[in-house]
Amino acid sequence: MEIKINNVNHIYNEFTPFAKKALDNINLSLESEKIIGIIGKAGSGKTTLVELLNALIIPSYGNVQVADFNIQKNMRLDNINKLRRKIGLVFQFPEDQFFNPTVREEVSFALKTFSYKSDRLHKQVSESLKLVGLDDNYLERKVSSLSGGEKRKVAIASVMVFNPKVLVLDEPTVGLDYKSQKKLLHLLKKLRNRYKKTVIIVSHDVDMLNLIADDIIVMDKGKVVASGTKREVFKNTSLFEKYGLNLPKIVEFIGKVRKEKGIKLGNHTDVKDLIKDIYRNV
Amino acid sequence: MNNIIGINSLSFRYQSKFIFEKFTLNIKDGEWISIVGPNGSGKSTLVKILIGLLESDSNIIVDKLTLNRENIDKIRKKIGVVFENTEDSFVAETVADDIAFTLENLAYDPKEIGRMVEDIAMEFKIDDILEKEPNFLSGGEKQKVALASAMVARPKILIIDDALEMIDEKSKNEILEILNKLHKERYLTIITITQNLEETYKTDRMVVINDGNILIDGPTINVLEEDKIFNRIGLSLPFMVDLSIKLKLYGLIDHIILDMDEMVNALWK
């Protein structure tokens, strides 16, 4: 399911003294079945951009095309509901999206909203929890008693339960320890490879994106300043300097060796491969 | 150096589960210590106990005072804390008022408050945003304001509780540099609580905890080499530590190098 963002401008509090331009003439085409990373400083428009994708925000100008849906002013409410079955959004702080006491009620909430029949409901909830690595023992647990990592998983399960084609996650690894992060990254890769989903991740963690993303979009002050495959974008080191962003550490190291010592190491994402390459070159 | 914090055989239960059982840790005056561990290891519970948000009946001494209800107000004056979600802690409409709030709470003379706020703002280079609304600041600015609020009453101990995770690298480095200066020039005792090992690089000592137990305690540069422990408890090794350990195994370097330029020059002299 391709997503096209056409000439989108978004202004918060437009026509008031507090007007603030958050997105500035965005044109983007996001390919299906890819993991796409969006990076940029705080306030660069990353979160606004992804909130457009499931019509949480309607663009002030321009439109977003998601399959047959056209997200723009005057979009019909029933279309918004249909669209949200296709695009699931997991917020930065999962607590922000919980409003049910138990895991079972939280995960089944969206299904009830979308009028699923109750016999299918239980199975879907169980399967969705299993997908994120939680078993049925979690069903009656209080959402408020879960750890940060478990809350994140429940938030993802409650979105995956209605089987959206696109999963959008805002800063998914924040607050998770390495083990939980690794499991989450494994899950996201599985969603792309086995279930053919498109996964869009907003994150400041470029090292994590270097490990799993196919494509990268770089934003600054509401504009898209670069987009392309991971390799193309991370190769452009001066761009990262210009916008005060970090490169993945491994990319930075390889670039430094090339610049200062004239030695060309390969474009590795794994430290083990890098070590072998260094060994051959010292 | 004397101990500024002494935790002696702390036992603490949440519902029926022991978070700490006979946990002992001494922190020296003027030391910069990092306490690291995965989610649920007890790090934040320890902070809450130290500032009296959670009560325990164990023997804890903070700057010669026993931690109890009677002394808690005095102890809170000695400890500044910066938490992860600073948004939750902003109360005033401007940055200046927010920093002043800490002093008002501690019943400082209103005549002194304005000057103290200006002094701390100059020191942390936030004097240009004093009249701004806290909610409109960037993540890095918010954390600097939270740090200024924590330090304005000149506490002897500063606790940074997972407070640098969400901010960009440039702001993070600026804050770490401010902390380094406070530590070196004012002998401030700093406790960094984190699961990001990069934030421990400048600390003198590292204590790794899991399930309420100390797994290892020693000079940071030595503890960082214990990759097996970090792997076991699920903490990620920063790139430079991971690279150093593996290059050491190959015999290409003989010690851990945390600075990238230094590493490149060590490999290709």
Image (cartoon, helix red, strand yellow):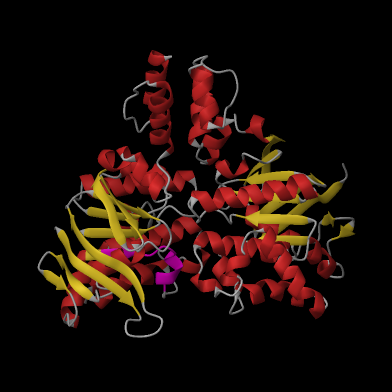
Q: Residue at x 33, y 72 (%)?
A: A21
Tell which of A239 and A113 is nearer to you: A239
To which quarter of the image does residue B17 belong? bottom right
Residue B250: image location, x then y, percent:
49, 15
Q: Residue furthest left?
A: A68
Q: Residue furthest bottom?
A: A16
Residue B78: image location, x then y, percent:
80, 61
Total tally of numbered discs in the picture: 0
Tell which of B187 and B3 is nearer to you: B187
Name above or below for residue A180 compared with residue A220: above
Q: Is residue A91 magenta?
A: yes
To which quarter of the image does residue B87 belong? bottom right
Residues in magenta?
A88-98
Residue B170: image location, x then y, percent:
51, 50
Q: Is residue A266 magenta?
A: no
Q: Residue at x 55, y 30 (%)?
A: B228
Q: Is residue A142 visible?
A: no
Residue B72: image location, x then y, percent:
82, 67
